[in-house]
């Protein structure tokens, strides 16, 4: 292999690493949720996902997830996206002294997509809530989004 061929191959690999697809798929999100739940199917309810439906800028989107934990203690809350480069956005672990089962953070969103919040309860059950959001100015993009 000649030096020029080697340099061209290296530059091509670097460009390929920089311009990669900016989104996962709904199947990737389902697989990430399945990993979090250990294969259990989350039930709908008990979880409230508070996020704006129309988002002007996807760079810092405020979200709040709260769980009705009257029957069992909330052990963990996870947030998943279907079109970000990584589907598992955040996982919060709550202890017995957490008090109110509510977490707030800011996340980045690559494009308009569906988000899911899943709660793991102390009785082994999983509860979820999904929302669809529209993002006007995308974040998390490397190259062009599909």
Image: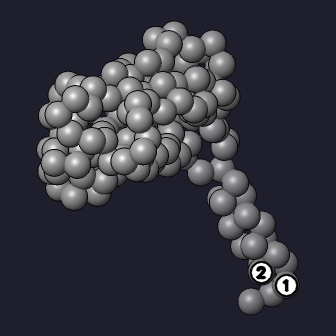
Quadrant of the rendered image containing residue 83:
top left
Q: Is residue 87 visible?
A: no
Would residue 140 be found to the left or right of residue 26 on screen?
right
Which residue is pictured at 17% across the width and 51% down the height? Answer: 124
Q: Pick whichever, 27 or 146, lies toward us.
A: 27
Q: What residue is disc 1 on?
A: 3
Q: Position of residue 5 (x, y in %)?
A: 77, 78
Callout 2 environment at 10 Å: few (<14), some (14 to 19), or many (20+)? few
The quadrant of the image that shows the N terminus is: bottom right
Q: Considering the numbered disc 2 on the image, is that residue within a helix, a strand or a loop? A: helix
Identify the residue shown where x is 32% and y is 29%: 67
Residue 47 position by quadrant = top left
| Placement of 62 over or under 2, stated as above or below | above
Q: Position of residue 82 (x, y in %)?
A: 40, 37
Cα distance in 3D space between marks 2 and 1: 5 Å
Whether 15 is drawn above or below 65: the answer is: below
Q: Mark 2 and 1 residues: CB-CB less than 8 Å, in contact?
A: yes
* Quarter of the view holding residue 139: top right
Badge count: 2
Disc 2: which residue: 6
Is 20 positioned to the left or the right of 86 in the image? Answer: right
């Amino acid at each position: 292999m000649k030096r020029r061929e080697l340099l061209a191959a290296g530059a091509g690999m670097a460009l390929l690493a920089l311009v990669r697809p900016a989104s996962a798929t709904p199947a990737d999100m389902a697989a990430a949720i399945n990993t979090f739940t250990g294969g259990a199917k989350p039930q709908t309810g008990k979880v409230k996902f508070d996020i704006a439906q129309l988002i002007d800028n996807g760079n810092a989107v405020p979200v709040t997830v709260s769980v009705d934990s009257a029957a069992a203690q909330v052990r963990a809350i996870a947030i998943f996206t279907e079109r970000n480069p990584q589907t598992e956005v955040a996982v919060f672990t709550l202890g017995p002294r957490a008090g109110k089962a509510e977490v707030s953070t800011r996340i980045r969103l690559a494009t308009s997509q569906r988000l899911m919040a899943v709660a793991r309860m102390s009785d082994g059950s999983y509860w979820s809530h999904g929302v669809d959001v529209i993002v006007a100015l995308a974040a998390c993009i490397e190259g062009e989004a599909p």
